[in-house]
Amino acid sequence: MDDCIAEELEVKLARVRAYMRERGLDALILRRFDNFAWITAGGDNRCAGATDVGVASVLVTPDDQWVLTSSVEGRR
């Protein structure tokens, strides 16, 4: 991974975790196209359809983060 992208992701995850702490959240899921693209530094979770949430989500906890999707969409 490019060092600039890695640094961008680190900064964004720190911002999300600060937001979570301020609001007493144990986890946060980002599903909307714009939120997914922001937290992944340009990732695209869109699929055909009239919705503003994609086929993948990012789950952020205080200690880790994951991309969640169905097994059908996993290869994408």
Image (spheres, rainbow, N blue to C red):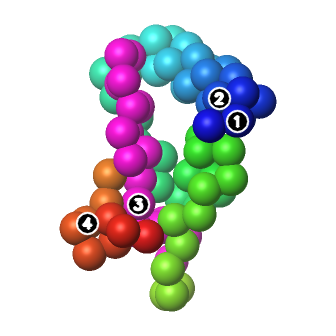
Image vertical order of residue 49 relative to residue 61, above or below: below
Residue farthest toward the right in the current orientation of the protein: 4
Q: Earlier in the sequence, mark 2 or mark 4?
A: 2
SS label for mark 2: helix
Q: Earlier in the sequence, mark 1 or mark 4?
A: 1
Mark in front: 1 vs 2: 1
Q: CA distance from mark 3 to mark 1?
A: 22 Å
Q: Number of labelled discs?
A: 4
Q: Amino acid at mark 2?
A: Ala
Q: Which residue is mark 2?
A: 6
Q: Which residue is mark 1?
A: 2
Q: Residue at x 68, y 53 (%)?
A: 42
Q: Earlier in the sequence, mark 3 or mark 4?
A: 3
Q: Which residue is mark 4?
A: 70
Q: CA distance from mark 2 to mark 4?
A: 25 Å
Q: Which residue is mark 3?
A: 56
Q: Earlier in the sequence, mark 3 or mark 1?
A: 1
SS label for mark 4: loop
Q: Is residue 12 visible?
A: no
